[in-house]
Image: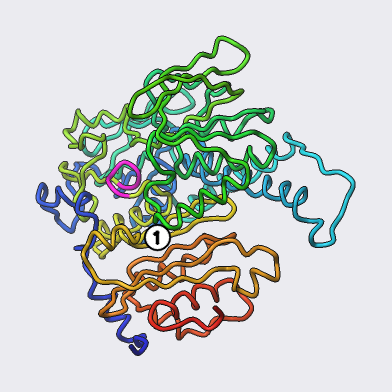
Amino acid sequence: MAMASLARRKAYLLSRNLSNMSSEAVRYSSLTSFSRGFASSGSDENDVVVIGGGPGGYVAAIKAAQLGLKTTCIEKRGALGGTCLNVGCIPSKALLHSSHMFHEAKHAFSHHGVKFSNVEIDLPAMMSQKDKAVSNLTRGIEGLFKKNKVTYVKGYGKFISPSEISVDAIDGENTVVKGKNIIIATGSDVKSLPGITIDEKKIVSSTGALALQEIPKKLVVVGAGYIGLEMGSVWGRLGSEVTVVEFGPDIVPTMDSEIRKQFQRSLEKQGMKFMLKTKVVGVDTSGDGVKLTLEPASGGDQTSFEADVVLVSAGRVPFTSGLDLDKIGVEMDKGGRILVNERFSTNVSGVYAIGDVIPGPMLAHKAEEDGVACVEFLAGKVGHVDYDKVPGVVYTHPEVASVGKTEEQVKASGVAYRVGKFPFMANSRAKAIDNAEGLVKILAEKETDKILGVHIMASNAGELIHEAAIALQYDASSEDIARVCHAHPTMSEALKEAAMATYDKPIHI
């Protein structure tokens, strides 16, 4: 199959429509009619008002301003960037990197001829570096608001009408912000579990896990998803004995099963322990630590387990509390997500929603794409987000990244397919730097060679995955990737070799 020309790719992109968007996300497309102009509100003060200054909200605000729309962004935290920047993606990656450096210094440097008598953890300095990164980035977004002339209101907003937002400002004042179009971008919050009260001391959420003042001897993580495994990795590298308790039979259930099994084995080699098919039925914090009562998920004999700190990481839920959505009649599903059509419009004219508050992956980069597409529609342009092609990354070591379908999903679809794999043990760059754990796995349609999914486990999988994301976005074949010249020696050559293994044969294995 010859590589597609740029002209064909451009024509393809121009011809794309929104029909591929998640059916769950567009199920209410028939609820509202959409006029390309702005909804009438009786106010010309703002073209766009965004509630929430997280990745979806601040990106939507900046893009709206860049498109010539008068824009105001309301943020209750007093610092832009939302959960992701303040108490999520960014601080966790700072600690993941710092803890990895310590772990490498202690366990790997000597293999490279770098030796020293002792290595110590300065936890306050580590936390300070994390906080500095967060502070610099939040100030950076404020600078972008000023550059793009976005009005920034610090306070908690709630609806008075579809075109009016009452804001209880941080300084104690109350003001009303009016807009022709209101975008709800309030993100998500930690999902609580029955009978477990988070105090951010002994029983912590991910927020508390980012700010522990000492390294717990024993840490229990409740929930084996992305966040739990990442934070468990941080404290495990720093010396904690980490046990992950998961109700389901698998860690990260959305992950390709073959990759998941290898990933779990890797984490177990690092000292992380897993108690799968297990539920927490009781928590006692009356002593110095935490005493957990556990039992099999299917029922059975109870056991006790003690820890110094328990991290509750059972997922996240849409955050819409206090918005008074019921006052204006915004419709939501049973999970508390706001229902929107393919233009991100709710059933209330002039009110839109993006990011974690609507169906689709709860990921910062997905929220950003929602924000851009939403305001492009408002400006009379065409936006597009394909939720089936949003990459996901677990930022442990090794990292695991994926885009597209898992092998289980492809099998369920009934499509005949091929699988190509290539281990990093056969990659020259990975061997040269002594970092060769993992593999690349590609799934492609048998008849057409169209790539259906790509899964990577590697130290830098989160960076490597984007070549695959572009390939999926343009409906490329595995041969398309295989015939692209990749620089040598690089770890990205493993993706090329996996592509060769998919449609023909690899060279180096």
Residue 139 visible here: no
Q: Is residue 53 magenta?
A: no
Vertical placement of residue 188 versus 32, above or below: above
Could you say where residue 287 lies in the image, as x and y percent from the top left?
Answer: 59, 11
Q: Residue at x 23, y 32 (%)?
A: 325
Q: Which residue is mark 1?
A: 66
Q: Residue at x 43, y 43 (%)?
A: 53
Of all residues shown, which one is farthest toward the top?
286
Vertical placement of residue 272 versus 492, above or below: above
Quadrant, the N terminus: bottom left
Magenta span covers which residues?
354-360
Q: Nearer the viewer, residue 124 or 391?
A: 391
Q: Residue at x 73, y 34 (%)?
A: 124
- What crowding class fits label 1: few (fewer than 14 Cα within 10 Å), some (14-19), or many (20 or more)? some
Q: Nearer the viewer, residue 101 or 264?
A: 264
> Secondary structure under badge 1?
helix
